[in-house]
Amino acid sequence: MTSSPDVEGDLVINIGPQHPATHGVLHLVITLNGETIKKVDPHLGYIHRSIEKMCESLSFRQFIYVTSKMDYLSSHINNHGCALCVEKGLQIEVPARAQVIRVLMDELTRLASHQLWWGAMAMDVGALTPFFLAFREREMINDIMEETCGTRLTMNYMVPGGVMADVHPNFQRRVNEFIKHFKNKIDEYDELVTGNVIFQNRTKDVGYISKEDAISYGMTGPSARASGVQCDIRKLYPYGLYDKLQFDEIIETEGDSFARYMVRMKEMRQSLSIVEQLIDNIPEGDFQAKTKAVLKLPKGEFYSRVETARGEFGVYIVSEGGTTPYRIKFRSPGFSNLSALDHMARGSKIGDLVAMMGTLDLVIPDIDR
Amino acid sequence: MTNEDLKIKLSELLPAVTFEEGGQWLNVNIESTDWLPFAKQLRNSPALNFDYLFCLTCVDWKTHLTMVYHLESTTYRHTIVVKSKLDRNKPEIETVSLIWRTADFHEREVYELFGVKFLNHPDLRLLILPDGWEGKNPLRKDFEDPVNMIKL
């Protein structure tokens, strides 16, 4: 796996596949000159499960469950994207109650994902306490999920036509408790890390990427919005209830690691506001539309786009009119975001690489699929 | 630009294109040999400005392969899907990784999973699969793996 350097005096080192800063089995082969990075070459596939091939033999109800295992921190949103794509093909109307529950779940997932990222990111640059604080709040969301969906991580809660079961009777109360709790804690997050001089020195002017390059590399999500790219699918191509909600798309223009950090911090407040808007306004009614037992998508191609915590997630289904998809492609945000790492890191010091990877918020199963 | 405007504009750029409508977006079918100059025009024409390649993939139709490119303009927000048929026994198409940098990884993925050769790609190596997998293409319809379970 290790290649010898092209130039005499260069050093080739491996980061990963087992390394605490890659947060998963990511393998980077890095060419160094002294401490300066000349090239970053990601070797992927350590957790490749060929999900796209697997889906070809699963029905239009079953394949959604596999997608929770891709970006396990955004599993609700992955499921949502797949459900949307099937609904698009079958023209299923989703009941209002299910729409609200879906958006609530999506935003709670986004919060949980950003919390974990915040803790892990701070840990990467040397601060250990935030990791424990982030888990304290994340645990509350996981408990809420567990009560309603039965699992804490890979929920498999969204189905074509709505959600699998109604929310737990405690749902509203516990989410309200969480909102009250987290509102103070998010200020604490800022106090602890954002304003910290050491943290700012580690992240400012590190891993710069311009707006043009970010678009060209197909970067999406908070990582691209930090470079000034307008790419929030919730705003551009609203799905679910997002066109009826009050929230801002966070854009920063600096394009460095600190800007990427700031976008996610501000996004947490937006997600919290969305949850607040909806939690006391869940309409009565069905949580699932009536659908046939066996779903058959008409012959054709269907594409749905959703905004996960990491960026644009696309589901491309080619159907031949049968009960299983002929071909499925998942456009995962992490895959494209990672491809920009080489461009970002060239010329930087090796010590800064961790600050770049941390703010790209890479989830390896999402990249490998 | 609306689909009608896009059709007129694209036909001017490449008279041989054919269109398919009815889906979510305008489908543009081209010959694989026309792809590179056509792609350059899509990216560089100020009226089109397709700067965002948000999905690149391939479909195995058993008789042939089809490359599928989803393109969007971040300034005008119009979207097209470019498709090109490839010979299944000798699939070859020009790389567009120098036009849209994201194509670099996506083309490497299609290369190993479908066996499509991207001509003039700067670094066409296996990305996901382990060394020694060249020639076996897991996402082709006739791929069978007796050892690792791939069908459920």
Image: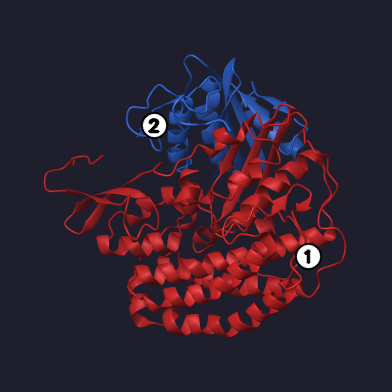
Chain colours: A red, B blue
Graded by Cα atoms within 10 Å as few (under 14), some (14 to 19) or many (20 or more), the crowding at tag 1 reads few
Residue with the most extreme left position:
A9
Res A234 visible: yes
Amino acid type, label 2: His
Q: Is B65 located above or below residue B73 in the figure?
A: above
Q: Residues within 10 Å of mark 2 (few under 14, many from 20)?
A: some
Secondary structure under badge 2? loop
Percent coordinates x, y for residue A346 in the rendering? 30, 54
Distance Cα–Cα, label 2 vs label 1: 45 Å
Residue A335 drawn at (x, y percent)? 47, 47
On screen, residue A103 versus residue A334, left or right, reads right
Q: Nearer the viewer, mark 2 or mark 1?
A: 1
Residues A206 and A198: in front is A198
Q: Is residue B90 above or below residue A165?
A: above
Q: Is residue A204 visible in this depiction of the protein?
A: no
Q: Label 2: which residue?
A: B121
Is A208 rendered above or below residue B118? below
Give me the residue at 33% from left, 48% from top: A27
Under mark 1, the amino acid is Lys
Residue bearing mark 1: A244
* Lateral position of residue A271 relative to residue A120, left or right: right
Q: Pinpoint the chain carrying mark 2.
A: B
The quadrant where residue B10 appears: top right
Q: How many marks?
A: 2
Location of the N terminus of chain A by quadrant is top left
Residue at coordinates 32% horizontally, 73% vertically from top-left?
Answer: A126
- The residue under the point 62% across, 59% down is A232
Circle 1 — which element? helix
Where residue A110 sits: x, y (%)? 59, 64
State which chain disc 1 sits on. Answer: A
The reply to whether discs 2 and 1 touch (Cβ–Cβ < 8 Å) is no
